[in-house]
Amino acid sequence: MRIIKVENYEQLSREVADLIAAEIREKPKCVLGLATGSTPVGAYKLLVRAYESGEIDFSEITSVNLDEYCGLPPDNPESYRRFMDENLFNHINIDKAKTHVPNGMAESLDAEAKGYEALIKSLGGIDLQLLGMGHNGHIGFNEPDEEFKALTHHVHLAEQTIKANSRFFESPEDVPKSAITMGIETIMHAKKIIIAVSGNDKANILKKALFGTITPRIPASILRLHNNLTVVTDCLT
Ligand code: GLP
């Protein structure tokens, strides 16, 4: 694992954007695994800027997002589809038909999860997966558990996650209670993984994930077994 320690969120965003831009230049048809949350917002802004100044071409990129809330239509302001459109896709020359986010409104969530997994396989897998990390060590919506859940699946969100994500909603009651998320195996199959972690409030859990026991109680801890993991963080001194 490679750890890039930076001093602040601006530097973190710059590093993450540079790593993604390098991947696109190296492989213009790459499959990008993308993440939501506040952490990647700065990097997405820089990627938009790089596109506007003609430095990156997204026209041949395919994207697959990590997760989506269940029960929020795609145009709901808090849905992850809307988040991706507003923070990235609407501002670059990516073909929207090639941007994939799980459908949290599907009639059968299990069938949707299976279909999403099959889609990723049919694309030849993920070249570069970007991750953030929740305060309980979750990645995507893989919550602390007794075991690592392998493939894309329907998941009930932990109370801590609902609380943390309620800052985007009017009240905690409005936060969806479940989601569809890529599983740990789906993520671990990506050829490269970048995890971006920002803020002192995540320093402890990040240290546990990187240097403690590998356990499903801290889902991010398994990433250390990946052979091409880059950690970009401003919370390790
Ligand atoms: C959500 C997302 C995760 C994200 C996490 C951390 O729960 N499902 O993919 O990494 O939030 O978000 P933030 O970056 O806002 O701390």
Image (cartoon, grey):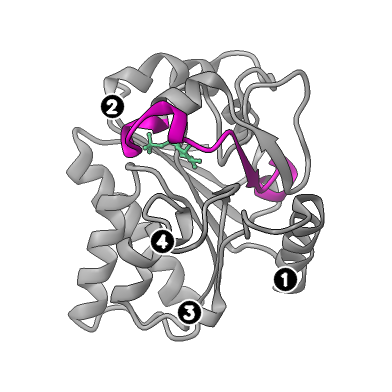
- Which label was assigned to residue 62? none
Which is more foreground, mark 4 or mark 1?
4
Q: Label 3 sits on what residue type?
A: Lys
Q: Amino acid at mark 1?
A: Gly
Crowding at label 2, few (<14), some or many (≥20) Cα neighbours within 10 Å? few
Disc sitting over residue 96 in the figure: 3
Mark 1 vs mark 2, CA separation in Å: 34 Å
| Observer-nearest of 149 and 86 | 86
Element type at mark 1: loop
Q: Secondary structure at mark 3?
A: helix
Find disc 1 in the rendering and name its residue: 124
**Is residue 180 within the magenta segment?**
yes
Marks 2 and 3, the one that precedes in the sequence = 3
Confirm whether residue 29 shows in the render: no
Determine which residue is flagged by label 4.
Answer: 82
Q: Where is residue 86? Give x, y as percent.
A: 32, 64
Is the CB of mark 3 within 8 Å of ligand 1?
Answer: no
User: CA gap, disc 4 to disc 1?
Assistant: 26 Å
Identify the element where label 2 is drawn: loop
Q: Quadrant of the C terminus?
A: top left
Which of the two discs, 1 and 3, sits closer to the camera? 3
Which quadrant of the view contains residue 218? top right
Question: In the displayed structure, would residue 98 be above or below residue 14?
Answer: below
Amino acid found under the numbered disc labelled 4: Arg
Question: In the rendering, which numbered label is found on residue 199?
Answer: 2
Q: Nearer the viewer, mark 4 or mark 3?
A: 4
